[in-house]
Amino acid sequence: MKAKLSMYTGAVAAALLSQACTKADPAQGAAETPSFATSIAGIGPCDSVNVDQSMVIHDQAIITAGNFSFQRTIQAIRNSSGGAITTDAALAQTLTSGLLNTSFTNPTSGLAMAANTRSAEAGLTGAGLLTDMQPIALFNRFDLAPATGANCGEYRIVYGRYPNSTFNRYLVIFEARLPNPNPGLGLAGCLPVAQFWHQLSDAALSDTQRGQMLEDFYYNGLPGFSAVVTHANYGVPLGQVRANMFMTPLWMLREWRTSFNLSGQAVFTPDTVKDNPLAEFYDETSFGTPLFISEQAAFSNDFATINMNNLLDFELNGAGVSACPEVNTVGAGFDDRYNEFQSVSQGPSDDPNSIASPAFRATIDGVLSGNSAFAGLNNSHVLARAGAMTCGGCHQFSVGQAISPTANWPGVAAGGFVHVKETGPTSPTNTPPAVVALSSALTSCFLPARAQILETFVCNASGGSDAGVTDSGVTDSGVVDSGVVDSGGTSTPCGGAYGSTCGSNEYCEFGPYNVCGAAGPGVCTPRPVNCGYTVNEVCGCDGNTYTNECFANQAGVDVSSQGACNSNVCNLRPPAGCCFDDSQCSALKGGECIGEDCAAGQAGVCKGLPPKGGCWENADCARGEVCDGVMICGCGQVCRFTDTPGVCRSILTPVQLSQSISTTSLSSQSTISTAQAPEAQLSDAELFTAVETAKGDLLNATTTQDAERALGTLEDAVRAARTREADQPGAFWRHRRTH
């Protein structure tokens, strides 16, 4: 397991180790040649990584060996935009956009949300940012890759402002989402990226070599991959830029993404802070406009169903990735329609545990009391988890809060608020510390789990069975190694590229974070001998329904999902008043079953004919249309709103997007929209094509009117792609979070 094997083989080795390509910088007029191109064979694919070399780089000896200056990052974004002529200072200046706004309008719901002004940060100049911001850390977030492999995760650069003092601090984090150049291969197309980061732990490398390799990765890209630092990777369509701000009282976090102005120049535009719902939504006694009231009601319903299911993943599905598994499994998945444009960390104003009304808490307790798996949990635990998903919570107010009777949310860096502490031992600080301090949340929980994901993925791709974790007990979990031994199986990889390699008395076990091999091969595991006849239907990876998981494993297959497999006929018996099939709604004229999911065991509700021009589901609409704006209280849910039909809206195809003369959003402006969004009807490729088409129309516009139309279409297409990506499950986390 610890043998020093060559990390690369065949074409992969040739591609990764021949980085002597040249790419011209339009601003400099000179070719840029990657500086490190040599064969390293000092680390085996199943060797464990050094977290401080492969997961986070926070040592200035490595960072300064490459050029990660703020100006270089801004320049690379500007040069790669394809937009009209602008300057680095002008582009950097747009990172202060929106800081004097007193309100923003959520682009999905149309709800106006109040904002606090940030006068000190708004006074920063673009030219000043170019010189004052210094790189302090690089983060590998391969773990954020989606299960589809449409992209290869996120790669971050953290900058701090110098000089600084205790209450005069400003941090900016560039979080690029790296596209998969071969999405048809799924996550396997991202293997070179995972191998690159794994290789950085090779003891044969010097800090200088690591810094130069990282510089090449971020600004030139691996062979076949785009550079990390490009305009598209920070928001057109995926990725973002965030800031932690201490210069104005009331510590706060904000978010931007890349876009263009009407002149076609690259800019950063304010965006919602993800997983950060408007705090007032937790208080059902809050007053506001009719739109606010209806959005608050929809949020309450979604929280009690969708979001609580995500937040309680640990109790529902068991232990996750090791290293604080209870903490690492928490996710929320708040719909962006609820998110506001700021996250306040100082004080209780954004803390759900301080804001939630008694009625909101009672709803949570009602859900908890209905499942024995939640014994010992109360509404405070759930609200603490929800708060920890926000930026302000993870950075401040959730620290130390109990998320269960046995676990608290982990801490920040010494001195408070940040997870990467840019300040040094003296004040004011003029330069970054030699090694910036990290939070205990990172060092004890998040980073070890992310490292385990990287190690196991690279090891399995090479034919290994684990990631070098000390084995200690029951069964290997496959792609995400649990640190326990294989119980009698051959321990050989199976599934995916390995095909059916297990023996006749084994089945291929993929583990909870790798459904049927979506994220890589599994491990051959002995088939159970005796199975109890408990009826708990599951869908096997072979598409067949089994009485329970044990019977599926006994038949030689792992489980795809709970409940029977999808079929034309669902054989589950619905609860009273609910349905699994239209035939069970015959008592209603034109009755149809809405919201059912047989595979998940979720029953729907019966609805009669929708009103003229209305709809209950997509099937009620014409071809090329979707049902938008429908709101239905699901089977078994407690709701405080009236069922409301939606309206049929056209789906905008990439061609229609480019020809559109309307700036109407792809996302519904309805206050009650919970229907499947139109963008879900398009593939990832179609959505990305739509973005590029609209971008081209904007940059080629010859009149202001054409530019306004094209920019509106581009914003719609970007939002559609971002919504699609956010809704996709992660390859390694059931419920991804952005921090």
Image (tube, rainbow, N blue to C red):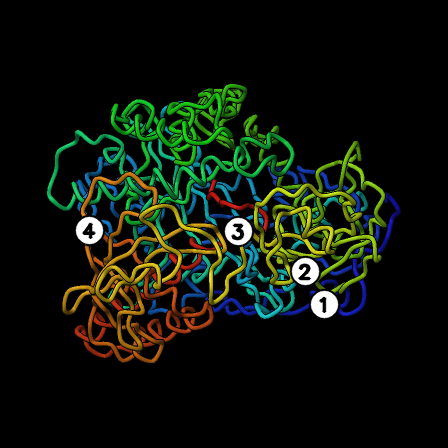
Nearer-N-terminus badge (2/3) = 2
Disc 3: which residue: 563
Alpha carbon separation for disc pair 1 and 3 = 44 Å
Residue kind at label 2, given as amino acid type: Pro
Q: Secondary structure at mark 3?
A: loop
Q: CA distance from mark 2 to mark 3?
A: 36 Å
- Position of the N terminus by quadrant: top right
Badge 4 element: loop
Q: Is the residue under label 2 in contact with that under label 1 (CB below 8 Å)?
A: yes
Q: Is residue 660 above or below residue 380?
A: below
Mark number, residue 671: 4
In the image, farthest residue toward the left:
289
Foreground pick, 649 / 460 = 649
Q: Nearer the viewer, residue 341 or 159?
A: 341
Q: Give how far apart the Cα atoms at labels 1 and 4 are.
A: 50 Å
Q: Nearer the viewer, residue 372 or 356?
A: 372
Is 183 drawn above or below residue 90 in the view shown?
Answer: below
- Mark closer to the chain start, 3 or 4: 3
Residue occupying the far front of the picture = 587
- Which residue was labeled with disc 1? 15
